[in-house]
Image (tube, grey):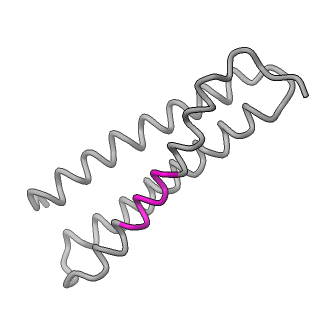
Amino acid sequence: MKQNANNDLSHHILPNSATMVGVCIMVISIVKSQPADMVSYFIDKALAVDSLLFTISALLSFLSIRLERSTVGLERWAEVLFIVGLVSMTVIAVIFSFEIV
């Protein structure tokens, strides 16, 4: 099987995106165990969307690794979605910690 020369980043995005999906699921389960209020509702929904971003990022990075044709575009989108997911998770953590909402 021929490896793409430019998919080194995808080899890092794939396992880290999968890990972040697990982190999102764990935090969602922690939030669900707390009394329901507007903050927990917002965090629950935001982390579900964040988990979806990480899942799509993992899928794109996997395809970038597996496909034999040029997959620079897939890798770029995987990177963008991963960064958006990280930034949104950081914002959610700040909101959760300081109960800004």
Q: Locate the C terminus and report the quarter of the image it occupies.
A: bottom left
The span shown in magenta is 19-26
Is 75 contained in the magenta span? Answer: no
Q: Residue at x 19, y 68 (%)?
A: 39
The tally of labels here is: 0
| 85 lies left or right of 4 | left
Q: In the figure, 74 relative to 62: above or below?
A: above
Is 20 contained in the magenta span? Answer: yes
Q: Residue at x 51, y 48 (%)?
A: 54
Q: Locate the N terminus and report the quarter of the image it occupies.
A: top right
Nearest the camera: 51 or 7?
Answer: 7
Q: Residue at x 81, y 23 (%)?
A: 3
Q: In the figure, 20 relative to 10: above or below?
A: below
- Image x and y of residue 83, in percent: 43, 34
Q: In the figure, 10 relative to 28: above or below?
A: above
- Image x and y of residue 82, in percent: 48, 38
Q: In the figure, 39 relative to 18: above or below?
A: below
| 70 lies left or right of 88 | right
Q: Quadrant of residue 97?
A: bottom left
Q: What predominant SS class does the magenta segment belong to?
A: helix
| 50 lies left or right of 98 | right
Q: Quadrant of residue 38?
A: bottom left
| 25 lies left or right of 32 | right
Q: Residue furthest top?
A: 5
- Image x and y of residue 93, in percent: 23, 53
- Image x and y of residue 27, in percent: 33, 66
Q: Residue at x 19, y 84 (%)?
A: 35
